[in-house]
Image (tube, rainbow, N blue to C red):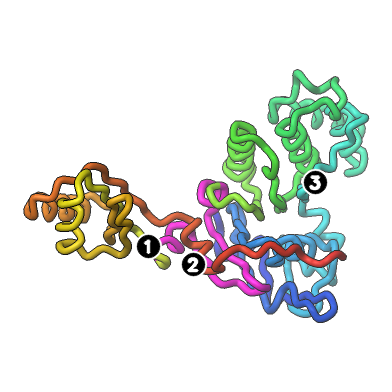
C-alpha cells in the first residue's frame, strides 16, 4: 500500500498544550498520509511525547482540532482507540508471563473470539521471530526481544495507525536494525500508518517518508528527508595536504569555507555529486596541488536537526 495524501491518517490543526506557564505545543499542524511512516523529531523537551499522548487520546489538547483515522479525538475517543496501537518509550510487557501468555492476554483484552486468540498469538510469534522464546518468561528476554514482543502485542488489535514513541531507545545496533525491518514490513505488507518519534536521526532517515522537526513547541521544518537536506545544504569536501607548501598554496587558490592550519585541512563547498567533484579535481590538477586525503560530506538529518534547532536542549518535558 502506498501513502495516500488525500486521506490523511492523522490531521492536526493548531494543536496546543501547556502545563501552567510552560507551553509545550504552540499551534502545531500535522498531516500524515495513510500508509506511510511519519517521523517527529526534536530535542528533549520539544513536545514529541506530548503530541503522541494527545493523538492517542491519553490527554486532551488545550486547543486545536485533531483527527486520527478519520475520527475526532475529543468527540470520538473510543473510535480512535479502536483504530490505533501505541508502543511507548517503556515496554508494556509483563515480565512474569511468557511471550505467548502476554499475547493471549492482549487478545483477551481486545475481546478476540476465543477460537482466534491462539491463532493470532501463534501468527505474531512466528512473524516477529519469537517462536523459540514463546514459552519463556518475558523477564528473561533481551532488550530487542522485549521490544519485538511489545510491538507484536500492539498488533493484536489490528490497528490502522501505530504510534511508536522512541521504539529503539537502548537497543544495540543489530536489534535496532531488526526493528527497522519489522516497521518497514508493517507498512509494506499491512498498509498501516506509523507515527514515529525518535532521537536517532539515522532511524528517521532510513524509515520515514516525511519528517517534521519540533522545537520549542513549534514545527520548524517539514518535508521528506531529501527535501529537508536540500533546503539546509551544507555539503562540502575536506582536503588534507601532506606538506605545508601545498597547503599554503591551496589556501590562496581555493575558496575554503573553513580551515585547520594545524591539521593542514581545508573544507570547500561541494554538493557531493560526480560533476562537482570532477570539477574540483580538475582545478586541483590545474594548480598542481597534491592532495593527501579527500573526504566528501553530503548533508544528512544531523545537519537538518542542528540547522533548525541549534544545540539540543537538555531539559525534559514537565511532569504530568
Residue span colored magenta: 203-230
Q: Is residue 210 magenta?
A: yes
Question: In the rendered image, which quarter is residue 123 located in?
Answer: top right
Q: Residue at x 68, y 71 (%)?
A: 12
Residues tagged 1 and 2 counted as in contact (Cβ below 8 A):
yes
Coordinates of residue 106 in the picture (x, y in percent): 88, 39
Q: Which mark is residue 234?
A: 1
Q: Are marks 2 and 3 in contact (CB under 8 Å)?
A: no
Query: In front here: 132 or 68?
Result: 132
Mark toward the start of the polypeptide (1 vs 2): 1
Q: Is residue 127 visible?
A: yes
In three-dimensional space, the C-alpha distance between marks 1 and 2, rounded to whole angstroms, equals 10 Å
Mark 3 Cα shell of 10 Å, populated few (<14), some (14-19), many (≥20): few
Name above or below for residue 117 compared with residue 235.
Answer: above
How far apart marks 1 and 3 lie (CA) works out to 36 Å
Residue 143 x/y as whole percent:
74, 33
Element marked by disc 1: loop
Q: Give x and y (percent) for residue 37.
A: 59, 52
Which residue carries the number 3 mark? 90
Inspect the magenta stretch and tell me whether residue 183 lies in it: no
Q: Which mark is residue 154?
A: none
Query: How far is mark 2 from mark 3, CA to CA?
Result: 30 Å
Locate residue 248: give its quadrant.
bottom left
Q: Tag 3 or tag 2, which sits nearer the N-term?
A: 3
Quadrant for the C terminus, please.
Answer: bottom right
Crowding near pointer 2: few (<14 within 10 Å), some, many (20+)? Answer: some
Return the disc, 1 or 3, that comes first in the chain's sequence. Answer: 3
**What is the number of the mark on residue 307?**
2
Nearer to us: label 1 or label 3: 1
Image depth: mark 2 or mark 3 in front: 2
Amino acid at each position: 500500500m502506498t501513502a495516500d495524501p488525500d486521506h490523511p491518517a492523522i490531521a492536526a490543526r493548531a494543536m496546543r498544550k501547556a502545563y501552567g506557564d510552560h507551553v509545550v505545543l504552540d499551534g502545531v499542524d500535522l498531516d500524515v498520509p495513510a500508509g506511510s511512516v511519519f517521523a517527529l523529531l526534536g530535542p528533549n523537551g520539544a513536545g514529541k511525547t506530548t503530541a503522541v499522548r494527545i493523538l492517542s487520546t491519553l490527554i486532551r489538547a488545550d486547543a486545536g482540532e485533531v483527527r486520527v483515522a478519520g475520527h475526532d479525538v475529543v468527540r470520538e475517543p473510543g473510535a480512535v482507540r479502536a483504530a490505533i496501537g501505541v508502543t511507548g518509550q517503556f515496554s508494556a510487557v509483563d515480565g512474569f508471563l511468557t511471550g505467548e501468555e502476554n499475547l493471549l492476554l492482549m487478545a483477551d483484552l481486545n475481546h478476540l473470539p476465543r477460537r482466534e486468540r491462539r491463532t493470532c498469538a501463534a501468527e505474531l510469534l512466528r512473524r516477529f521471530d519469537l517462536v523459540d522464546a514463546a514459552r519463556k518468561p518475558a523477564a528473561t528476554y533481551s532488550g530487542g526481544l522485549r521490544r519485538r514482543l511489545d510491538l507484536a502485542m500492539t498488533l493484536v488489535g489490528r490497528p490502522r495507525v501505530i504510534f511508536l514513541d522512541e521504539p529503539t531507545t537502548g537497543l544495540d545496533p543489530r536489534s535496532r536494525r531488526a526493528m527497522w525491518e519489522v516497521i518497514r514490513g508493517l507498512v509494506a505488507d499491512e498498509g498501516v500508518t506509523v507515527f514515529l518519534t525518535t532521537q536517532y536521526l539515522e532511524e528517521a532517515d532510513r524509515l520515514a517518508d516525511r519528517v517534521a522537526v519540533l522545537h520549542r513547541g513549534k514545527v520548524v521544518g517539514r518535508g521528506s528527508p531529501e527535501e529537508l537536506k536540500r533546503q539546509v545544504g551544507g555539503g562540502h569536501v575536506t582536503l588534507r595536504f601532506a606538506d605545508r607548501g601545498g597547503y599554503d598554496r591551496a589556501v590562496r587558490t581555493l575558496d575554503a569555507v573553513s580551515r585547520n592550519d594545524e591539521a593542514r585541512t581545508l573544507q570547500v563547498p561541494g554538493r557531493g555529486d560526480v560533476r562537482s567533484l570532477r570539477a574540483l579535481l580538475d582545478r586541483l590538477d590545474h594548480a598542481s596541488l597534491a592532495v593527501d586525503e579527500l573526504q566528501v560530506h553530503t548533508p544528512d538529518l544531523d545537519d537538518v536537526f542542528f540547522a533548525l534547532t541549534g544545540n539540543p536542549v537538555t531539559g525534559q518535558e514537565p511532569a504530568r
